[in-house]
Amino acid sequence: MQRDSGELPEPAAAGGRDARAMAQRDGGGRGLSWGLPRLLLWLALCGLWRGGEAGTLPARGAALPFGAGSPAACSPRCQHGGLCLGNGTCLCSKGYEGERCQHATCYPKCKNGGECLRPGKCRCSPGYGGRYCHKVSCEGGCQNGGECISVNGVVKCLCASGWTGSRCQEAICPQGCRNNGACVAPGICSCPAGWVGGACHLAVCKLPCQHGGKCIAPNVCRCRLPYSGLQCTKKRKE
């Protein structure tokens, strides 16, 4: 009885003759139970060798066999370079998941309602930023020392003392700014010409009011009797 060397025969174009010869050689003393698995393995290697020699190796996304039987078929096809296995499931490329590898994965996951567009790239919801949407972002930013915060899912600026507005852009003057004055900093008014004071409440008369007269508007004196005139210098005759 011829001893088995344990080596597989090289693939040949006439696969049938080689298969029959191999079966006869192995079947003499060991039986079909030993020769059939080796025969199937040899045929599989022969097929892969021929495919590689012809330049027809399967590309990514193609159907691959899963054990013995018909070629795999995935419908719909595996996306993003996934491989179709013989049991009809997809083996996904790194960075994708899902039944058909249709979903990109981001790690860490996108936070605050963000969406993973492609591996490692998140599209953030309004009000959030950062690589994984983990940072609160107020449109236009918060001015004058304000801090961007999220309260119950609502993003807004938390303003420093003395400031208000959606971006903390407005100063607060508790005393108010009169006569068209503008509050430019906490408690500080910018007054128009002819007015002064913390609240722009004091008029300025370039020529001072005389005899107890009072400047009530820019360059306007309110005189006490019996005086009149621009500076309250004219005395009425009795």
Image (cartoon, rainbow, N blue to C red):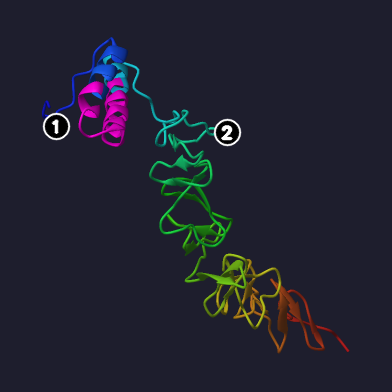
- Locate residue 126: give its quadrant: bottom right
Give residue 75's mark. Answer: 2
Dot 1: element: loop
Q: CA distance from mark 1 to mark 2?
A: 41 Å
For badge 1, the amino acid type reads Gly
Looking at the picture, how far across and down is residue 17, in whole percent?
A: 28, 12
Looking at the picture, how far across and down is residue 43, in whole percent?
A: 31, 24
Looking at the image, residue 84 lies above or below residue 50: below
Looking at the picture, how far across and down is residue 135, in whole percent?
A: 47, 63
Q: Is residue 57 magenta?
A: no
Crowding at mark 2 (Cα within 10 Å: few <14, some 14-19, many 20+): few
User: Foreground: 6 or 167?
Assistant: 6
> Which callout, 1 or 2, points to the residue nearer the camera?
1
Horizontal relation, residue 177 to residue 38: left or right: right
Q: What residue is pinned by disc 1?
A: 6
User: Foreground: 62 or 31?
Assistant: 31
Looking at the picture, how far across and down is residue 127, in whole percent?
A: 56, 59
